[in-house]
Image (spheres, helix red, strand yellow):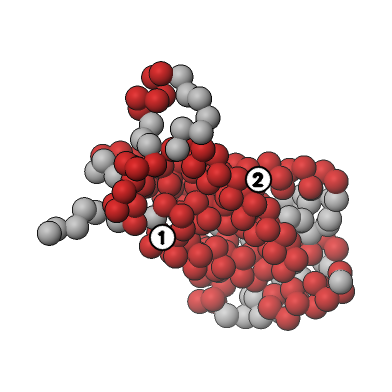
Amino acid sequence: MANLDFRLEHDLNRYAGHHHALDTFFKGVAGSQTEVAIGVVLIVVVGLVLRRPNVWVGGLTALGGAAFGLLANVIVSHLWDRPRPFVAHPGLVHLLVHHKADASFPSDHSAALAGITVALLVFVPWLGAIGVVWTLLMGLARVWVGEHYPGDILGGYAFGILGGILAVWIAMLILTRRVPLPAFLDRILPRREALGNRRFALVPSRS
């Protein structure tokens, strides 16, 4: 399995460093974690400003999904300290960006994005669809620049999806008031029915 993972990584990474436009694009995508985090925070802010509970609840749940996915990654990476491809195969892997030689499995970026995407697919599906595209591009980019094996990416996706599902489950428990809340939170946080038919829209429809 490890040999297959390296062959797949090498099949993609061997083109790195030979196509300037692709290198620039994939380096940008691979390092876009700050922009993604800012984007999710903006989703929360815009949802609050426009009074769209599905949007800001989705944004907060997305942050929770990312956090749960990353927590799982921390645990797993301590159990299996897999060397990164540029460490295990220094003469064969083209590393296009600077990166410390920490554990390769699972990919933190993939886990965080998958957790975010799951939550957005539930609460704001069109934003979730954008998340799916960016999550897949991010995984491809991390292999292209030499930071991860494909298996690292898939592992990150798996933990991120589980984290996203857990975050959505907790959000639904709160929205349906299946867990007791302090009085001030009960007043602040919306109920499930408040999402209503507006659940899938960011901007109110004009009718």
Count how many numbered circles sit on residues in the image.
2
Find disc 2 in the rendering and name its residue.
70
Q: Secondary structure at mark 1?
A: helix
Task: Determine whether 172 is above or below 7 in the image.
Answer: above
User: Foreground residue, 36 or 101?
Assistant: 36
Could you tell me which quadrant the C terminus lies in?
bottom left
The x and y percentages for residue 133 are 49, 68
Q: Amino acid at mark 2?
A: Leu
Residue sitting at x 40%, y 25%:
186
Determine which quarter of the picture holds residue 105. Answer: bottom right
Could you tell me which quadrant the N terminus lies in?
bottom right
Determine which quarter of the picture holds residue 175. Answer: top left
The x and y percentages for residue 92 are 80, 74
Q: Secondary structure at mark 2?
A: helix
| Mark 1 or mark 2: whose residue is earlier in sequence | 2
1 vs 2, front mark: 1
User: Which residue ends up furthest to the left in the rendered image?
Assistant: 207
Image side of residue 100 versus residue 57, left or right: right
Q: Amino acid at mark 1?
A: Pro
Image side of residue 97 versus residue 131, left or right: right
Image side of residue 43 versus residue 152, left or right: left
Neighbor class of circle 1 (other Cα within 10 Å; few <14, some 14-19, many 20+) is: some
Residue sitting at x 31%, y 48%:
196
The x and y percentages for residue 47 are 32, 44
Residue sitting at x 26%, y 41%:
51
Find disc 1 in the rendering and name its residue.
125
